[in-house]
Image (cartoon, rainbow, N blue to C red):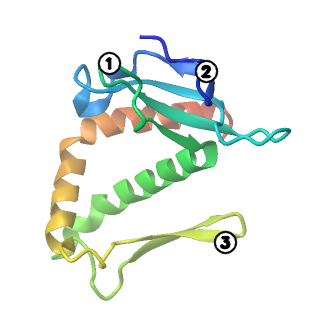
């Protein structure tokens, strides 16, 4: 299925077969494509690039399609990597976290830092963190494959 090019987001680079590789939902997802392109929120004379997940309901392109600025895509990748690293050793803690020290890391970015913490504002955190950890473990092979590809590409780019 071809990603539309007549909408506000202007695709430049596309993956139009994303439904075949969409994690656990592969071959049974409404996420039909990914694109990198010119952001829909661009003001005249100012260009931003963004990433977009294109969802198709079976009848039309969905308003639930998501568009993210490129730096947010990378910030999500950073958060994913740091969280995965955290859960490699979290089994050592009785609750999978320390209630007295919920800060996992502060990652320096743009002269400040991204705080990564366990969300103790969640009233169900003790149960939810176990479910999250289990899901991360269940999807370990799939996530690991993507992290290895990302690592290889970053090395090829000189990072």
Q: Position of residue 123 (x, y in %)?
A: 21, 77
Q: Nearer the viewer, mark 2 or mark 1?
A: 1
| Numbered label tally | 3
Question: Is 83 left or right of 58, judged from the image as shown?
Answer: right
Say what secondary structure mark 3 lies in.
strand
Q: Quadrant of the N terminus?
A: top left
Residue 59 tag number:
1
Residue 97 tag number:
none
Position above or below: 11 against 154 = above
* Residue situated in front as seen by the camera: 63 or 68: 63
| Residue tagged 2 | 13
Residue at 43% in and 58% down: 82
Say what secondary structure mark 2 lies in.
strand
* Residue situated in front as seen by the camera: 67 or 107: 67
Q: Nearer the viewer, mark 3 or mark 1?
A: 1
Would you say the residues marked 2 and 1 are in contact, meaning their CB atoms lie under 8 Å apart?
no
Would you say the residues marked 3 and 2 are in contact, meaning their CB atoms lie under 8 Å apart?
no
Q: Position of residue 146 (x, y in %)?
A: 40, 34
Bin the neighbour count of mark 1 within 10 Å (Cα to Cα): few under 14, some 14-19, many 20 and up. Answer: few
Return the disc, 3 or 2, that comes first in the chain's sequence.
Answer: 2
Residue at 17% in and 73% down: 126
Q: Quadrant of the C terminus?
A: top right
Question: Is 59 left or right of 78, judged from the image as shown?
Answer: left
Residue 112 tag number:
3
Q: Quadrant of residue 28?
A: top left
Position above or below: 122 against 151 = below
Say what secondary structure mark 1 lies in.
loop
Marks 3/2: CA distance? Answer: 31 Å
* Residue situated in front as seen by the camera: 144 or 62: 62
* Residue situated in front as seen by the camera: 92 or 59: 59
- Return the residue found at the far top: 1
Residue at 60% in and 29% down: 36
């Amino acid at each position: 299925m071809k990603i539309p090019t007549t909408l506000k987001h202007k695709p430049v680079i596309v993956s139009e077969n994303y439904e075949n590789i969409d994690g656990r939902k592969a071959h049974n997802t409404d996420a039909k494509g990914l694109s990198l392109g010119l952001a829909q929120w661009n003001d005249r004379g100012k260009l931003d690039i963004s990433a977009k997940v294109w969802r198709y309901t079976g009848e039309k392109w969905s308003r639930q399609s998501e568009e993210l600025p490129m730096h947010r895509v990378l910030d999500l990748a950073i958060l994913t990597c740091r969280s995965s690293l955290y859960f490699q050793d979290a089994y050592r803690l009785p609750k999978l976290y320390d209630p007295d020290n919920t800060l996992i890391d502060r990652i320096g970015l743009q002269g400040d830092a991204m705080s990564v913490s366990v969300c103790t504002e969640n009233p169900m955190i003790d149960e939810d963190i176990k479910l999250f950890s289990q899901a991360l473990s269940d999807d370990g092979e799939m996530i690991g494959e993507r992290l290895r590809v990302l690592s290889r590409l970053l090395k090829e780019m000189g990072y």
